[in-house]
Image (spheres, grey):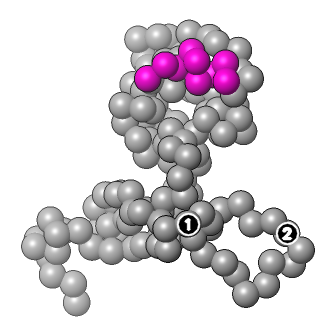
């Protein structure tokens, strides 16, 4: 991944810290700021700096913030240029990418747009993964 090019194309200044955070996120999608901070520990980046970098990258459209029901923190992933969804196991929290429900962005169209231009539709499928289901069957 050409992290420097991605940052430049997004109009962001290329810094060692931004490169480290973006590379860590590319290696471990769906990570929280805490997890990314742990992954870049060798780069001596403070947690508030990781939060600021994630905010800058999300605002610039380089990464996507993933908000899940019942989650105590946001997760982040490198923007893939599609409108995919997520499937989350309600027991272990495993998260998987699911292709767009219809196949054309933004996938879902509301009955009323209230005069707004729709950018994306976010769907989270809540499920029980096979491993969790084998350990403890659903009631």
Q: Quadrant of residue 27?
A: top left
* Of 58 and 101, the residue lying toward us: 101
Q: Which residue is mark 1?
A: 104
- Look at 41% across and 11% down and name the residue there: 42
Q: In the drawing, does residue 71 fall left or right of residue 62? A: left
**Label 2 environment density (alpha carbons within 10 Å; few <14, some 14–19, many ≥20):** few
Q: Give the answer, above or below, for where 38 lies relative to 109.
A: above
* Of 23 and 50, the residue lying toward us: 23
| Highlighted range, magenta | 1-9
Q: Residue furthest right?
A: 115
Q: In the drawing, does residue 114 fall left or right of residue 23? A: right
* Of 134 and 113, the residue lying toward us: 113
- Look at 70% across and 81% down and name the residue there: 110
- Look at 54% across and 42% down and name the residue there: 79
Magenta-colored segment: predominant secondary structure: helix
Taking the magenta stretch, the answer to whether it contains residue 8 is: yes
Q: Is residue 69 visible?
A: no
């Amino acid at each position: 991944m050409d992290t420097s090019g991605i940052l430049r194309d997004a109009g962001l200044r290329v810094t060692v810290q931004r490169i480290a955070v973006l590379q860590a996120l590319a290696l471990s999608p769906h990570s929280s700021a805490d997890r990314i901070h742990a992954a870049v520990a060798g780069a001596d980046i403070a947690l508030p700096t990781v939060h600021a970098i994630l905010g800058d990258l999300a605002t610039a459209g380089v990464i996507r913030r993933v908000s899940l029901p019942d989650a105590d923190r946001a997760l982040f992933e490198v923007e893939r240029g599609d409108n995919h969804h997520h499937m989350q196991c309600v027991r272990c929290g495993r998260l998987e990418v699911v292709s767009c429900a219809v196949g054309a962005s933004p996938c879902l169209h509301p009955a009323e747009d209230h005069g707004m231009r729709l950018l994306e539709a976010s769907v989270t499928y809540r499920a029980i993964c096979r491993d969790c289901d084998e350990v403890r069957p659903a009631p």
